[in-house]
Amino acid sequence: MAAAPALEIATPPPAARPAAWRPRILLTTEGTYPYAMGGVSSWCDLLVRGLDEFDWCVLPIVAPHGRAPLYELPAHAREAGPIEVWSEALPRGRRAGRPRAALPGALVRGLLGWNGDADAVLAEWLWCRRNPAGVRRAFRSGAGWAAFLDGLSDVLAERIPEAGTPPRLDLVEAAALYQTLYWVARTAAAPTPPADLLHVTAAGWSAIPAAVHRALHGTPLVLTEHGVYVREAYLAAARGGGSPGARFTATRLARGLARIAYASADVICPVTDANAYWEMGLGIDPAKILVLYNGLRQGEPPTPPPGERIVVSVGRIDPLKDIHTLLRVAQETLRIVPDARFRHYGAVTDGEDAYGRSCLALHHQLGLGERFRFMGRTTDPTGVVRAADVVLMTSISEGLPMSVLEAMSQGRPVISTCVGGVPDVIKGCGVVTSPGDDHALTMAVVMLLRNPDLAWRLGRRGHDRLGRIFNEGACVEGYRELLHTMTRERAQLRAVPS
Amino acid sequence: MSPDATRARRLVEARLGRAPQDALEAAVVLEAWAGVPAQRALETARQLMPRRAAAPLASVAVPTVTRRPPGLLVEGLAFLVSVVAIALWAQPLADSLGGAAVERALRLALPMALALQWGLRARHLGRPSGLAGLARERRALAAGAALLVAGLGALLGEAGVLAALLTVTWTGGAVLIRRGASAFYATAVTAATVALLAGAPGLVAVAGVAALVVAAGAWALRGAAGAVVPGRWSRTLGAALTGAGVGTLLAGDPTVTWTAGSLGALALLPSAAGGLWAGLHLWKLAPALPRALTGVPAIVPSSPRGDVAAARTAGSSRGVTAHSLVRTLAGAAGRLVAVTAAGSLALVAVGGGPAGVLIGFGVVALASLLVGLLDSLGRPAWAGWGVAAGVGAELLVRLASPFPGAALTAGGAVALAVLAPAAIVLLARPARTLATALWIT
């Protein structure tokens, strides 16, 4: 096992910062803050509100949905964009010059090739940024399509033992990939506001505008990984039941984006040690890695659980949350404890409507009825877990989930799968089982429902543990130190006459 | 492969139900489902991948189900009822307001109504969130309708008021039909027809039905709520201009009289019916296009040794049969021609409009069919240019029209000549069309 991540941040002397200068941070998000509740969004909100000595600019990347933001940004933060992918909006800028027909080919080689050239992709992204209107022209042209097919031919011809043999994509899959690469290019073409520091919240799409900005201006880039982007993409593809071609393109693209994100980042902050080991395994220099745990306010001493045998789960309806297992566990539990009640809070992830429907179908098939209720999105995640006797999480991939911290803040015991940083967090204050282990999860739920004293004792331990280790102050202070260090270095660089 | 790696590979294959795609997938499975720590999982996964490349798996995209929107036939029938009813308005309106005023009003209302209908469809009505989008703009739409009546009335007097009222009625009708209130719209128009035939004052009857349609539209939109993702303005404007162009094609020929009894306007009916049937048939293209490409390898090995590195691409029209797609288009065109011809012959038999006019409406209907096709294939600008060419030709020929309907026929024919090759080219290279036009909007 490799050595633990080694990056250390020195506490900045407060006097070193000019009083009038407020560093500007560009926070890029992907389908989360400020348009989705909970999880990464809760963490973003905590950071933005907690670090009010910075001027925050939030740049969300979202699918067009027409909904209003769910979080109101504080006075020292504003939203730029959002960048709407898969929208009908035309790129900004005037038509100029010939379309760059080679663009799609270069992107498919650089992003999907096992040893794709990250620098070549960045060079193409820079061209997109300088010629936003040219992106659409390139992809609408027959020459662009031909160049893409040539690039795809190279990728599919790769024979590297570690990479396996690429499948023979059909034309529909190729066209779908072509469209996705178009939106990658459009995302790279989107303007970014001036910033002294770039803070990326996932090693995927949200890294694209930041990587371009960094390449243009040399602005330092911090990457916080809540899950491991590549790992989650592989898990989703493995469980998605798509064709070999769809699986190949989804995972290779995620890997390509993550490689560029890692290469562009000056500091990578996983939220748990487990993720740090993944990142090192993916070839990241441990010196770049700094583990900063998520945190949550400990709050008042917890109140006892309601004693109504209510099991609450909070999370998006998404394959990574493994709602199917949750439903099966509910059915088994109800067989043993008929008066138990399950409530799931969270909306279907954008683009996962089919999975959402499959959950409803399974709910119907298992005959759960009113005993398991999908409650939809909540704006009060701590309130809903307070009303629980037990909090249950069946995810197959997590970083350090806020929903677990929220349960601990309310003194509720957590039963979870041992994924990501969860086992480290709920050590001594909950129960962990293997992912997808219906029986073990059911037994744990039944045990705690039948032993409310034990459940309450575990809950209080969780509350104490949150205050000691995973508290809001430690999380915010960790980032305060890191961000000040990096923006100070930037300010010093700016002070040097060119 | 070491025994450990062999065991790990079996475990991964058991979990996935197939061989792992690559070492990363194997590592993820080992970590997520077998509890192997990340770094060890990655190392083991690299070892368990075979040294010799396996044969590539043929991948077939999971087809997405595209169905014709429900109620399309009912909507079409409601439209036909409206065409018949409005054709019956021509004579009573001419009796009430004078033939010249009604002619002028119809020539103005047709392009305006089509522009508004096509624009609204691009912006809202053709989209999943369309009704909610319109609901948000309910007041603006009602105010726009009132302004249109007042403005055109001030400019053109009674003809302007009538043109505005007809525009409002037809546009509001499109909203009602989209809302599923086709029967209501058809009933309202039929009631106005009965009133007009019974001798009700022309403007009052039309104003009544316009007000009813606007009120019903506003009421129908009341319940529509939710997130709105409207179409972009440039597309809306383009669609509106194309709609106006088609309307101008239909109404721009001065030799076509709309008020010479009911048969004048009824000349539009055969081509409208043919267009409806053809449009329904053309919906087959929506699933047929991706289906034609599903399972067709994007890259085909072409060297004698089957070396993929020396592959040639199959993404152009080469290697992909597009016959079925072009045949579907031909089938739609055939239906339109057959119905138009049969209906026109029937009209001629009962003393309807001149043959040139009936042929002209048929040709314009064919051109309109192709306009809709090009728009849905992601080339609205081509559609716009085709219509513009048609309008230009119509304007030229109307300077010296050799027979009634000549300008209409010429305009339609030129539009058709521009649009048909474009449509055939798009359908003949389906992969490129899907990738560069349909999915890059």
Image (cartoon, grey):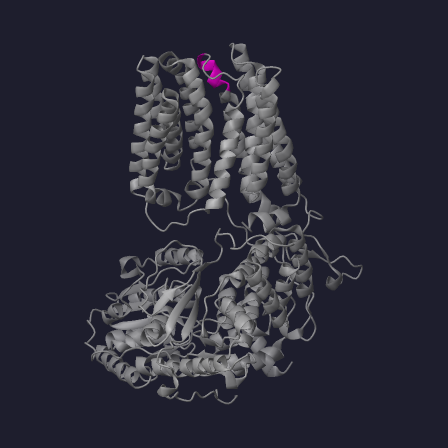
Looking at the image, residue B440 lies above or below residue B286: below
Q: Quadrant location of residue A318?
A: bottom left
- Number of residue marks: 0
In-image side of A379 versus B3 (left or right): left
Residue at 42 percent across and 89 percent down: it is: A10
The answer to whether one can see residue A404 in this image is: yes
Seen from the viewer's position, the closer of residues A495 and A287 is: A495
Please name whichever residue, A11 or B380, is drawn nearer the observer in this view of the structure: A11
> Vertical placement of B105 versus A387: above or below?
above
The magenta stretch spans which residues?
Answer: B261-267
Q: Nearer the viewer, residue B328 or A458?
A: B328
Q: Is residue A285 left or right of residue B173?
A: right
Camera-side residue of A120 and A333: A120
Q: Is residue B152 part of the magenta span, yes or no?
A: no
Rendered image quadrant of residue B103:
top left
> Whole-percent x and y of residue A18?
38, 82
In terms of image quadrants, where is residue A469? bottom left
Q: Is residue A132 above or below residue B387?
A: below
- Give residue B271's position: percent from left, percent from top: 53, 24
Residue at 51% of width from left, 10% of height from top? B350
Tell me if residue B262 is in the magenta stretch: yes
| Residue A441: % across, % down | 36, 73
| Residue that sits furthest to the front in the current view | A497
Q: What residue is drawn where x is 50% and y is 61%? A: A190
Q: Can see residue B14?
A: no
Quadrant the C terminus of chain A occupies: bottom right
> How would you classify the magenta stretch by its main secondary structure?
helix
Residue A421 at x, y = what percent? 41, 79
